[in-house]
Image (spheres, grey):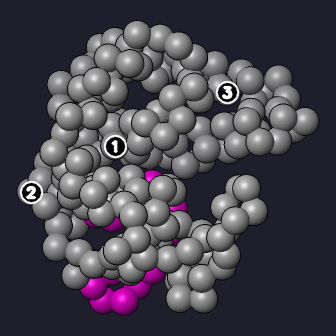
Amino acid sequence: MPTLHHAPKSRSTRALWLLEELGADYAIDYIDIRRADGSGGCDPNNPHPLKQSPALTTADGQTIVESGFIFLYLTDLYPEAGLAPRVGDTKRADYIAWLGLYTGVLEPVITKKFRDTAGYTPQYEAAFETLDTQWRAALEHGPYLLGDTFSAVDILFGSLLQFFRTVMPPHAVYDEWLARLNPRPALARSMAKDGAP
């Protein structure tokens, strides 16, 4: 079974939620990470090359890092859960595009906007505004990012707003979307497992 190397209340919490939604049989390895406030430390047992989270060890011993890639791997491993369009589905490209936007654009832009404000250039602001517009437009056509069906990209993007709602501008479409996501039983199960045993 896969093992999630999980630091409580971190980016790996979203992977817990995904694993619960997938109905996967998995193990949790609770790890420590260096936090933005300077607390925590680098856990020598963490297989992530930068000692961050999340990291996933597959059943055959391979390590995958970065949320987008972990989500792609797991949804392909458990296709019967229906949390991602399969290869050949017309929505597959949209699914992969959302995963890429999160990892390659949204995370770096948000880091600049809220942590490295001196480096937050007009180009970053333009990227942020474009993402906000695209995200809201998808939800306005939704009710989920890929349309009528809840998917793993709702977990990925939704977990950000659950953790840090003010990262995106106030808008009813975001709040209504979160109200649809928050009652999910798999989310409650993942929150119960989020803290160290």
Q: Quadrant of residue 90?
A: top left
Q: Earlier in the sequence, mark 3 or mark 2?
A: 2
Q: Residue furthest front?
A: 197
Against 43, is 142 above or below? above
- At horizontal 16% and vertical 73% (from top left) the residue drawn is 25
Quadrant for the C terminus in the image: bottom left
Camera-nearest residue between 38 and 148: 38
Image x and y of residue 125, in percent: 74, 24
Q: Quadrant of residue 111?
A: top right
Quadrant for the N terminus in the image: bottom left
Q: Which residue does the numbered mark 2 point to in the structure image?
A: 80
Q: Is residue 108 magenta?
A: no
Q: Does any portion of residue 70 appear in the rendered image?
A: no
Image x and y of residue 44, in percent: 60, 89
Q: Earlier in the sequence, mark 1 or mark 3?
A: 3
Image x and y of residue 12, in percent: 45, 60
- Residue 184 is tagged as none
* Tag count: 3
Residue type indicated by callout 3: Ala
**Chain part drawn in magenta:** 58-74
Against 77, is 143 above or below? above
- Residue 155 is tagged as 1
Is 157 on the left-hand or right-hand side of 50? left
- At horizontal 23% and vertical 48% (from top left) the residue drawn is 188
Residue type indicated by callout 2: Glu
Distance (Cα) linking label 1 and label 3: 22 Å
- At horizontal 39% and vertical 64% (from top left) the residue drawn is 195
Residue type indicated by callout 1: Ile
- At horizontal 22% and vertical 67% (from top left) the residue drawn is 77
Q: Quadrant of residue 143?
A: top left
Q: Secondary structure at mark 1?
A: helix
Q: Which residue does the numbered mark 3 point to in the structure image?
A: 127
